Image: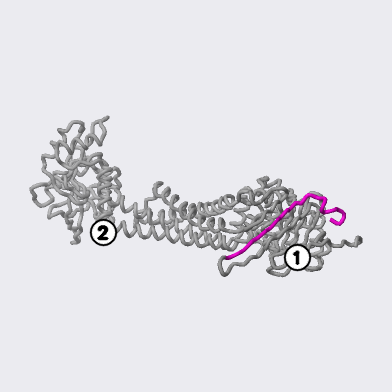
Amino acid sequence: MNYVALKMLFGDRAKYLMLLCGLTFSVMLIVQQGSIFWGLMIWSQSSISNLNVPIWVTDPGIAQVDEVKPIADTAVDRVRSVPGVDWAVPLYKGLLRARLSNGEYHQITLAGLESSTLIGRPAEVLEGRFEDILQPDAVALDQWAVERMGGPDVMKVGTIFELNDKLARVVAIAKTQKSFTNIPVVYTTYERAIRYVPRERRTLSYVLAKPKDGVPVEEVTRRIHEQTGLGAFTAEEFGWKTIGWVLKNTGIGINFGTTILLGFIVGMAIAGQTFYLFTVENLRQFGALKAMGTSTSTLARMILLQAFTVGLTGYGVGIGLATVFGFLTAQSGGLPFIETWQLLLLVLVALLAICTFSASISIIKLARLEAAIVFR
Amino acid sequence: MSMIDSQAQPAAVHARGIVKSFGTGDTKVTVLRGIDLDIYLGEMLLLVGESGGGKTTLLSAIAGILDIDDGDIDVLGVPLGELPAGKRTTFRGQTMGFIYQQFNLLPALTAAENVAVPLLIQKIGLPEALRRARAMLDRVGLSDRAEFLPKNLSVGQQQRVAVARALVNEPRLLICDEPTAALDGPNGQKIMELLREVGRSPDRCVVVVTHDSRIFHFGDRLARLTDGRIVSIEPIAQEGTA
C-alpha cells in the first residue's frame, strides 16, 4: 500500500506543493536562524578560539573573556609551579584607542603576547611576518582591523598610527575569526602592550597554559584552581562560559529562539492544516480502502509515509536553500553562519516532530472514520 | 438463481434479529427493527425500498463495517459479531467486494492501479496485482483504458472500473450500493449483466441495493425493506421461465 500512499500524495499536486513549501520554509527558517545564532555564539568566544591555547587562568570572579579582570603578575609563576603544567605565559588584553594619521580614532583590543614564544598568535598570516612584532614599535592587526579602520589603503603593512600617544607600526596582518563586538585586534608583545596602556597596579589579564603531554587538561585545570585560587578553565569551558554569559545578558537567545520557534510553529501549522485537509478531502477514498479491508494501522502507516516523504523532501530543499544563503552571506562576511551537524540533526528531529504531529491529526480522524461512510 | 433451489443452498449471509439505532434520547432513530434475512450462494438478491428505509444500513451491517445493536450476522459461516475489528477487516478484504454508488475510485491512481488496490491490500506484489488488474479490466471491456486516470474516463467507464475492482480478488460476497444510479440505461444494463454473471457462480452471491426498477429482472429475489423491516422477499420471474 506504500505505492498507493505515494501516488495519492503526489497525485494531489497542489496540496503536495503547499505541504512541501510549508515544510521547506520552516526548515530553511530554522536552519538559517539557527546557523546565524550559532555563528554569533562562536563569534562571542572568538577571543578564546583565536588564541588556540588549552588552559586559561583568570581572576576567580570572571564572567566572560571580554570582561577582563586583571590578576597579579605573580600568577604566571604560581601557575608554572603547579604539577602537570608544561608551560604558562602571560597575556595582556584590554581596550585602547588608536589614533590614525588621518586623525580618526578607533577603539581597538590590544593583545600582548609573551615575546619569547608568541604563544596565542593567530595561526594564519595574510600579509607580512608575525614574528616582526618583536621589532621596535611593531604591531600586527587582524583583518577586521583593516576593514574597520579605513580599509587596505589606510591600514596595511608599514602603516604607522598611535596607541595612547605612542607609535605603533603595522608589520603583519593576520587572519582570525571575527569577534562578536567586531572591535579590531592589535597584537604586540606583552612587554610593549603594558607600555602602551596607562599605568595600572595590575596589568596581567590572563595566564595561558598547557598541560604536560599525557596529563588530562581537565585535571591540570582543576589543580591550578585548587593550588592558586585563580579561575582556571579549559578553552572549551571558557568558551561555553562566555556563550552562557551572552545568552543570559543579551536578548540574542530570546530573539533567535523566538524566530526559530515561529519557524517550527508555522511549519507545524501549515503542514498540519494541509495534511488534515488532504485527509478530509480524501475521506471517502480512505473509507473505501477501509471497507475493502485496509486496517487502520495500514492507513496510519500510509499517512506517516506520506508525511515523512514530503517532510524529508522539504528537509533537503530547506537545508539546500539555507546553505546557499549561508554561502552567500559568509562570502560577504556580514553575517556569521555556521551550519553544524548538530543543528541539522536537531532540525531533522523538529521536522519529524512536525510530520508526526501533522500525520497524527489525520490518523486520529481516520481511526474514527466509519467505513460505512462509503455507502452514504 | 432461477435454476437453483435457494432453500437447498447454504446461506452465505445469515442475519437474524438485526436491530440498529442512531442517536440517543429524543433524537434516537431506530433504522433496522429486527431484520431476518438469508442470502444464498449462487444468487443475486435485490434490496429495494423507500429512501431512509434502512437499505444502506443493512448493507453496511452485512459488510461488517457498521456495528449493530442487537442480532447476529453470519457471513460464509463466520459470525461477524464475534470477530475483533482487525480480523473483521481482514475477513472483509478476503471475502467481500464492494461497488459504490459514487464509485470511490482513487483519483491519483490509473484505472489499472485502482483495480489492483484490493490485491495490494491482500499484500500481493505490485507487478502481479497490476497484471491481474489489467486482465480484469479486459473482462469489463476497458483494457484500452488501463492507464487512464478516473477523471479521463466517462461515468460508465468509471463504474466498470469500480466493478473490476470489486471482482479482482474474486470475492464470494459482492455488495453493491446503487450500482446503476449514475449510469444511463445501456451502461446500467451492461453492468448488471456482469453482476448477474458473478451472482450465478455457485460459490458466490451478490446483494444489490437499488431504486432502479429497470434492473429488477437481473435479480433472483427481491427483498422489500420498509421502515426498518423486511416486508416481503419474492423470487423474480426470469425471462423465459415465468
Q: Is residue B12 left or right of residue A185?
A: right
Residue A135 visible here: no
A68 in the magenta segment: no
The residue pinned by badge 1 equals B231
Left or right of A171, for residue B189: right
Circle 1 packing at 10 Å, graded few (<14), some (14-19), many (20+), is few
Percent of width and height locating residue B64: 66, 54
**Residue B211 in view in this figure:** yes
Chain under numbered label 1: B
Q: Answer with the quarter of the image where residue B2 lies.
A: bottom right
Range of the magenta residues?
A: B1-23
Please give left or right for residue A280 compared with residue B62 in the image.
Answer: left
Q: Which residue is mark 2?
A: A150
Q: Are marks 1 and 2 on the same chain?
A: no
Q: Is residue B15 magenta?
A: yes
In which quadrant is the N terminus of chain B drawn? bottom right
Nearer to me, B155 or A169: B155
Circle 1: element type:
strand
Q: Nearer the viewer, mark 1 or mark 2?
A: 1
